[in-house]
Image: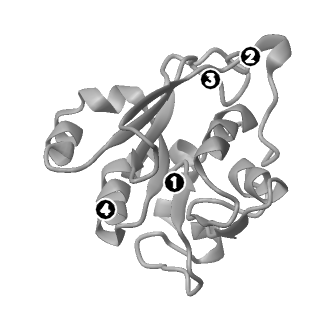
Amino acid sequence: MKNDLHYKKRDEYYTPKILVEPLLEYISTDKVIWCPFDEANSEYVLIFKEHGYKVIHSHIKEGKDFFTYYPDEHFDYIISNPPFTRKLDVLKRLYQIGKPFALLLGLPILNYQIIGEFFVDKQLQLLIVDKKVSFDGNTCSFNSSYFCYNFLPRDLIFHHLPHNNTGNNYLGSRMY
C-alpha cells in the first residue's frame, strides 16, 4: 500500500530510552497509558511496563489506525511519538479525545503558522529537554520535546538530560 510505504520511510523513528524516562516523574503508577503509535517492543511500552504501569499499545501495522481505533479498555493518558507527517491530524484527534497526553514532537513546529493557528485556543503544556537527542547515534539538528495537555503540574517545564545520545553515550531503541 502506498501510504504504508510513505509512512515507513518518513515517520517511523524509534524513540530512545533517554527521551522516555523524563515522563516517569509526572505519572503515578496507578494510571493506565495508551501508546497509540507503538508496538510491544517500543521504548514507551517497555519502560512504562518496567516501572509498573499498565500499558495499552497499538500500531497501524497491527491494523489499529489511531484515526479510527479507540481501545476498549480504560486508559488515563496517551503518550507516544506520532508520525511526523501527520502531526496536525494527530493533535486534532487528541484534543477531540480530551484525555491528558504527552506527545513527542520537534520544537521547530512551533514556528509553523498552521500549528500556531491550531494552538491559539488550546491549552498547551511543554516539557522541554535541554539536548538535541539523537534517534540514530548521529547528532540531531533539532530538539524534540513533549507537547502536553493536562499532563504536567505547570505549563512549561525544562528538563535536564545527562547527554544527547550520541557517540559513546548512544543507546538505540530496543525496536531495532
Q: Quadrant of the C terminus?
A: top right
Residue 34: x and y in percent read 58, 66
Q: Is residue 142 above or below residue 114?
A: above
Q: Which mark is residue 7?
A: 1
Residue 45 left/right relative to 104 = right
Residue 3: x and y in percent read 46, 61
Mark 2 Cα shell of 10 Å, populated few (<14), some (14-19), many (≥20): some
**Residue drawn 57% across the image and 60% down it:** 37
Residue 144 left/right relative to 156 = right
The amino acid on which the numbered mark 3 sits, given as a three-letter code, is Val
- Distance from disc 1 to disc 4, alpha carbons, whole Å, reads 23 Å
On the image, numbered disc 3 is attached to which residue?
Answer: 133
Mark 4 Cα shell of 10 Å, populated few (<14), some (14-19), many (≥20): some
Residue 152: x and y in percent read 46, 44
Element class at badge 3: loop
Element class at badge 4: helix
On the image, numbered disc 2 is attached to which residue?
Answer: 166
Q: Which is nearer the N-term, disc 2 or disc 3?
A: 3
Q: Which is nearer the N-term, disc 1 or disc 3?
A: 1
Q: Quadrant of residue 109?
A: top left
**Residue drawn 25% across the image and 26% down it:** 111
Q: Which is nearer the N-term, disc 3 or disc 4?
A: 4
Labels 2 and 3 touching (C-beta < 8 A): no
The amino acid on which the numbered mark 2 sits, given as a three-letter code, is Thr
The amino acid on which the numbered mark 4 sits, given as a three-letter code, is Tyr
- Distance from disc 4 to disc 2, alpha carbons, whole Å, reads 34 Å
Mark 1 Cα shell of 10 Å, populated few (<14), some (14-19), many (≥20): some
Q: Which is nearer the N-term, disc 1 or disc 2?
A: 1
Q: Quadrant of residue 155?
A: top left
Q: Nearer the viewer, mark 1 or mark 2?
A: 2
Q: Nearer the viewer, residue 161 or 38?
A: 161
- Distance from disc 2 to disc 3, alpha carbons, whole Å, reads 8 Å
